[in-house]
Amino acid sequence: MIRHKTSLVMICLAVGTQVAALPGGAQTQSAPVQVPIREVDLSDGTRRYAITIKVDGHPIDAGLDTGSVGLRVLPGVIDSATTKEVGPVQRYGYGVGTTLEGPVVRTEVSVGDLHESARWQDIHAIGCSAARPDCPASHVDRRQFGIQGNGLAGEGFRAILGVGLASADLPNPFREIGAHRWIVELPRPGETPIGRLILNPSEQQIVGFTPLLLADARRTRSNDAVRACLQRNDGKPVCAPTLIDSGAPGIELVNHHADNGWTEGTAARLTFGGSADTEAMGVRFTVGRRMQASRFNAVADPRVEGMRIRSGLLTYFAYDVLYDADRGTIAIRARPAYQDGVIAVGGSHAD
């Protein structure tokens, strides 16, 4: 679930092509913490992913969203009398148009065995942006609204855990509770419905990850876009800042006139890097396959400057993804192929 910004600076980040390990920096590394990631399917078939966290001692299923930043909790979950406001009212908007408004508060937040006093948004109001007044929140009574619920009554989550590395007014909740890096391994179709999140993975656990070229290499960048190209096997590549987002179930090509060649059954590839090099790491997929989360859509979005690719779940189905908050980097390691699924190409497979 992507929070939109209207500009993106293309800066080349010089990184190696393959590393045995990505150093965690000079900080003392905490012991790894592993947390299950569960797939939750909405009634319209959309895949969502949740982990159980505790906020002020209350267990909550929170939507895991790598495309936004900040822990945000709906009304009625936490007794407001136990919270202390530590920041002004914020209004945070998502790509689908939903906006969440409320003050920043502080309580203890726990993810697995990792816990600390942390800031989060206590949502008081739910609405839609001016750009998308017909957002999911407009289709359901606020008392039955769930975050990432697609406007379906009683579906979605009471909280969202935005764990991207982009700059935001509300800090990344993992960093707040002492995580310096984390690995996201989503469950895949046809396999176990449980994946795993590893907070503060060990040096051994990060062996074999390859850093991706970021579209904007600054530590205060507006989002987590990487450099990548999207290409049909019989077409020309489209290269643009590309978002890897656990909250976006399909593929979108933004502000580019896509021809009719992107029909169901079309063979295609997402290639990481600045060009469509067939030797580079990437994902091979077939358009319109539910097992691959490869539904394709070309959209115009006036909030986005220039072209953009939203790759959705493709990368997570093909790779484990490592986020290093101290270094501000994103890296991937290939997963084995699965039946009727996407295929990681150009890199060695995990054991």
Image (spheres, grey):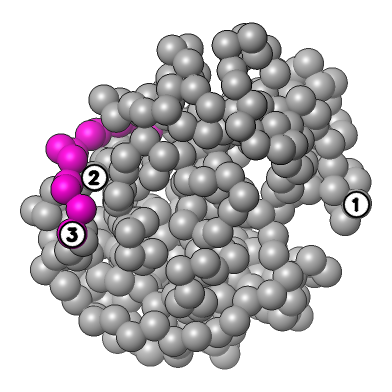
Viewer-side label of 1, 2? 2
Magenta stretch containing residue 28, yes or no?
yes
Q: Viewer-proximal residue, 161 or 272?
A: 161
Q: Please name the amino acid that badge 3 sits on.
A: Ala
Viewer-side label of 3, 2? 3
User: On the rendered image, what quadrant is the C terminus found in?
Assistant: bottom left
Q: CA distance from mark 1 to mark 2?
A: 39 Å
| SS under mark 3 | loop
Asked if the residues shown at circle 3 and circle 2 are in contact, with their CB atoms under 8 angstroms apart, the answer is no
Residue name at image x 64 percent, y 9 percent: 81
Image spot of residue 274 (x, y percent): 45, 87
Residue name at image x 75 percent, y 18 percent: 144
Numbered mark located on residue 57 in the image: none
Q: Tag 2 or tag 1, which sits nearer the N-term?
A: 1
Numbered mark located on residue 26 in the image: 3
Question: Can you identify the residue that label 2 sits on?
Answer: 200
Please say if 347 is above or below 2: below
Asked if the residues shown at circle 1 and circle 3 are in contact, with their CB atoms under 8 angstroms apart, the answer is no
| SS under mark 1 | loop
Q: Please name the amino acid that badge 2 sits on.
A: Asn
Instruction: Give the side of residue 102 with respect to residue 87, left or right.
Output: right
Image spot of residue 6 (x, y percent): 73, 70
CA neighbours of label 3 inside 10 A, class few (<14), some (14 to 19), many (20+): few
Q: Quadrant of residue 23?
A: bottom left
Q: Viewer-proximal residue, 145 or 179?
A: 179
Viewer-side label of 1, 3? 3
Q: Residue 192: in sight, yes or no?
A: no
Numbered mark located on residue 130 in the image: 1
Q: Viewer-proximal residue, 206 or 176?
A: 176
Image spot of residue 315 (x, y percent): 41, 60
